[in-house]
Image: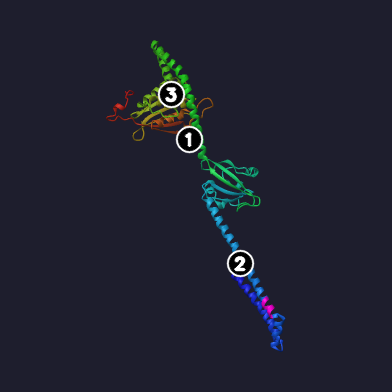
Amino acid sequence: MRAVQLVLAAASVLYLTYNMLKITGEFQQAENWAEFWTEEWRSGSVLTMLIGSGLFQFFILALGWSMYLRIRQRETINIRLRRSEQKFRAIINHAGEAVFLLDSEGRVQEWNKAAEQLFGKSRRQVMQQPLRTLDLGGELDLNSIFSDVQRVRRSLTYELQLTRPGTVPQILSTTFSYIAPGTGAFAEKAGSYVVIARDITSEKQLESRMSETEKLAGIGQLAAGIAHQLNTPLGSILLSAQMLEEDIEDEDDAEDIRRIIRQTEQCRSIIKGLLNFARPTGSGRTRVNLSDVVADTVYLMDKNLKVAGVLVEVEETCDPWVFGNRNELEQVFFNLLGNSLDAMQDGGSVQVKILRGDPGEVRVEFRDTGEGIPEEEQDRIFLPFFTTKDYGKGTGLGLSIVARIVHEHGGRIELRSKPGRGTTFILSFSEARDRVGSSSLIDDSGGD
């Protein structure tokens, strides 16, 4: 601005100098100086020169100040725009969700920090690049989305599955919003689109769990009706079998009757467990010998094991006493044996080892030589209603009941399996210990 003022001042000086020289030249040619100045003053040349010079200088100064004010106004607007842009960028960079801007052709115009973390692409890599050409791990039909968003003139939300090597698949909720031409600092003539992407994987998992919980609630109501209908005939069967046992003299027939009685009692226990599936019971806890529980379970399933050609070996290397509910623990090994039989259609073997685990724990290693469980299904194997069996051959409740019972006993259950190399379940229970002064709290009826 100072340079402009200097130029204007120089122009004014040159104009005045030119007029002075002109008058001076005429003055030198004049014979009478007094008459010359009198004539010039009367003709108005001097006054015209002075007034013209002043008006010219005023016009120049007014023009200069006008240009100065325009430049200052433009600088102020540019400063405000820069501050607004910095504020805008700071806001979207601190947003917890991925936010990016696309032009009408789908090219990236803005990309925040959350988008960098979510998609694994830096801002420098994606700027001015078409979104469809970027390998972000998901597919979106942008042409169709842009058309829909422009047609309805409101935000639309789409779900996108994000899959990248070495990471767990994610489910994204992507919301597209249309910015009409001429509105917004970053809008173009053809309009642009703001996209907000949010990871909803945990929400989907929560919805799935809530759905399973609702199923469990329905199963609980159904189980109440089933129990009411089945307990009566099961009681009659049990009573008839017990009466028949008293009249049978042949030992082989008596053994079959006793097996019927035990199986009927097991059915009643299973129904009771189904009723209590959605709630922990924690009742009827005593000292239980795990070796006896395994032996009784194998005895109940003896005929099924022989028909399937499966050999069960039980090995005990430590004190097998734990504190728990015998019927529930029988359900654990009953379900595990049943799953092993299903996995060994051509026969095989089951090895049950009872050994010492971590301090204060008894560990049971239950291993079969079946087909094994695929690795991608192992994380879901304990979920309710999940089954690898064909439709109609399994409810998906067996292993979930096993896991629930083990956890209610304060234990842990682990799965180790490789396809074609069998499956091993490792169960850990707290060891039952006799304490001085606590004998009245412990029922030793299950002891030797």
Q: Main secondary structure of the magenta part?
A: helix
| Highlighted range, magenta | 46-51
Residue 48: in magenta span: yes
Check disc 3 and report its element: helix, strand or loop. Answer: helix
- Along the polypeptide, which appears first: circle 2 or circle 3? 2
Question: In terms of image quadrants, where is residue 332?
Answer: top left
Q: Amino acid at mark 2?
A: Tyr
Check disc 2 and report its element: helix, strand or loop. Answer: helix
Q: How far apart are the two marked residues, 2 and 1, measured between alpha carbons? A: 72 Å
Numbered label attached to residue 310 = none
Q: How far apart are the two marked residues, 3 and 1, measured between alpha carbons? A: 28 Å
Q: How far apart are the two marked residues, 2 and 3, measured between alpha carbons? A: 92 Å
Numbered label attached to residue 379 = 1
Q: Which residue is mark 2?
A: 68
Reply above or below: 389 against 192: above
Q: Which residue is more in the foreground, 112 or 162?
A: 112
Quarter of the image with the N terminus in it: bottom right
Q: Amino acid at mark 3?
A: Lys
- Along the polypeptide, which appears first: circle 2 or circle 1? 2
Q: Please report contact status of discs 2 and 3: CB closer than 8 Å, yes or no.
A: no
Q: Please report contact status of discs 2 and 1: CB closer than 8 Å, yes or no.
A: no
Q: Which residue is mark 3?
A: 272
Question: In terms of image quadrants, where is residue 8?
Answer: bottom right
Q: Which residue is more in the foreground, 136 or 365?
A: 136
Task: Select label 2 or label 1 by which is in front.
Answer: 2
Quarter of the image with the C terminus in it: top left
